């Protein structure tokens, strides 16, 4: 796995990053009870308590166990509980049964985190470069789980008839409805995509972003913003979910089998569309980006709108000059929701943007040796790439080359739509 070069960050910077990431996870779960943190509403989602423990297991296993000879496991039974999918690490508790783990308690998991944090901080000055690289990877891994923790909690709470809020909603600031979508002509011809390190990035990238390679783009244009809730409501009103002409065959089968009529968490009450969020149920904001839609829905909307989804390379080329730390992203515990555009193309934050590209390896991709080689490569089948980050993505985690990926029917993440068209 090609990740962060050992010279890309000083030990002090890495220690600060580690402390900040770990503190944010603790802050995110502060509003939760032990019962809240144990919930598992579907197989795709995991309990908050499990996210806290699994990210700790990663540091304990790949850094402390493997690189600190005097370290002893916090509890020798827990690796079985908190390994996720690393076959090289042996047997593990079934994913679908994680919600049955009433023990260890949330307090015990927090004690586990504190003990591992202390051991990492004490060991860091003596660790070899390989272990420091794994700490950097572990921080990025935990940031991914911070987003999953929030989207999983949202789904857990959504199945409760009381529809509890995790925190109060942010104050609403009146924003004018955006005008019609504008089009940005994209780069055409041969462009470079992906990353080679350390030349291209003095920091971090996941192995699936490498290597940098040439790709050919036809003449095309991308929308200057993502699709809004108001525009999606018009798609619904026009019978978009009932017209098979706009849907892929698998998508139409999914719509029919699951009786899908709107984005996840939407309900129509007395003719008014509402959505459920981490701040409870509220009327949809027609100016805000639509979210919680599947690839199937995104593709159908694009067809209905007379457009298509961008390829991941079209998206990357367009976003390459933008600041990846800009936009509405996660900075601290508190209200998390997409916000209306304030003008100008925004490539990062608010909602992950579906592309029409399959999640497959780049030319020259190589899987690393050992357990960490299972991180990305083995999932390159049957999934589609998303780009840009969301309101639940920790700021500083994404970049133009970042590749997220989900199966085409999944929509519990903050996923949205940007249109593209051929020229």
Image: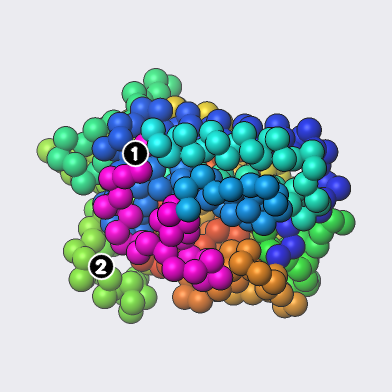
Report whether 386 appears left or right of 229: right
- Asked whether residue 238 is in view, the answer is no
Q: Nearer the viewer, residue 350 or 397?
A: 397
For disc 2, the marked residue is 255
Are the residues flagged by discs 2 and 1 in contact, CB closer than 8 Å? no
Q: Is residue 60 above or below residue 313?
A: above
Q: Residue furthest left?
A: 270
- Quadrant (top left, top right, bottom left, bottom right) of the C terminus: bottom right
Which residues are drawn in magenta? 77-106
Q: Residue at x 86, y 48 (%)?
A: 7
**Image spot of residue 364 (x, y percent):** 75, 77
Task: Judge depth for marks 2 and 1 and give the one in front.
Answer: 1
**Image spot of residue 270 (x, y percent):** 12, 38
Q: Residue at x 51, y 62 (%)?
A: 405
Indicate yes or no whether the magenta region holds residue 46.
no
Task: Identify the element where label 2 is drawn.
Answer: helix
Q: Residue at x 16, y 35 (%)?
A: 162
**Quarter assignment of residue 376:** bottom right
Q: Nearer the viewer, residue 276 or 308?
A: 276
**Quarter assignment of residue 346:** top right
Task: Identify the element where label 1 is drawn.
Answer: loop
- Asked whether residue 88 is in view, the answer is yes
Report whether 414 appears left or right of 16: left
**Quarter assignment of residue 80:** bottom left
- Mark 2 vs 1, N-terminal side: 1
For disc 1, the marked residue is 105
Q: Is residue 408 above or below residue 30?
A: below
């Amino acid at each position: 796995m090609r990740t962060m070069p050992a010279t890309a960050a000083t030990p002090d910077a890495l220690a600060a990053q580690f402390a900040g990431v770990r503190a944010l996870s603790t802050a995110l779960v502060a509003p939760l009870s032990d019962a809240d943190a144990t919930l598992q509403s579907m197989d795709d989602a995991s309990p908050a308590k499990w996210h806290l423990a699994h990210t700790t297991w990663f540091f304990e296993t790949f850094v402390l166990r493997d690189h600190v000879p005097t370290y002893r496991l916090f509890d020798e039974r827990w690796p079985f509980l908190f390994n996720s999918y690393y076959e090289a690490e042996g047997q593990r508790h079934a994913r679908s049964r994680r919600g049955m783990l009433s023990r260890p308690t949330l307090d015990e998991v927090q004690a586990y985190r504190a003990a591992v944090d202390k051991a990492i901080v004490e060991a860091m000055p003596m660790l070899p470069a390989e272990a420091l690289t794994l700490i950097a990877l572990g921080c990025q891994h935990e940031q991914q789980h911070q987003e999953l923790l929030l989207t999983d909690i949202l789904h857990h709470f959504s199945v409760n008839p009381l529809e509890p809020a995790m925190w109060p909603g942010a104050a609403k600031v009146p924003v004018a409805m955006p005008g019609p979508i504008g089009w940005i002509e994209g780069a055409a011809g041969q462009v470079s995509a992906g990353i080679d390190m350390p030349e291209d990035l003095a920091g971090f990238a996941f192995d699936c972003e490498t290597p940098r390679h040439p790709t050919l783009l036809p003449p095309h244009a991308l929308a200057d913003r993502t699709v809004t809730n108001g525009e999606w409501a018009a798609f619904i009103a026009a019978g978009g979910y009932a017209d098979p002409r706009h849907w892929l065959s698998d998508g139409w089968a999914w719509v029919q089998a699951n009786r899908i009529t709107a984005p996840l968490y939407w309900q129509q009450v007395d003719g008014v569309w509402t959505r459920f969020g981490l701040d409870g149920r509220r009327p949809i904001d027609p100016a805000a980006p639509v979210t919680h839609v599947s690839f199937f829905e995104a593709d159908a909307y694009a067809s209905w709108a007379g457009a298509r989804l961008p390829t991941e390379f079209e998206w990357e080329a367009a976003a390459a000059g933008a600041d990846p730390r800009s936009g509405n992203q996660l900075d601290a515990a508190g209200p998390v929701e997409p916000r209306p555009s304030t003008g100008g193309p925004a490539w990062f934050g608010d909602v992950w943007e579906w592309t029409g590209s399959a999640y497959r390896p780049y030319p020259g991709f190589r899987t690393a040796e050992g357990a960490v080689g299972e991180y990305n490569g083995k999932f390159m089948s049957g999934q589609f790439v998303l780009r840009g980050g969301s309101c639940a993505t920790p700021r500083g985690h994404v970049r133009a080359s970042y590749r997220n990926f989900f199966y085409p029917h999944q929509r519990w993440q903050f996923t949205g739509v940007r249109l593209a068209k051929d020229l």
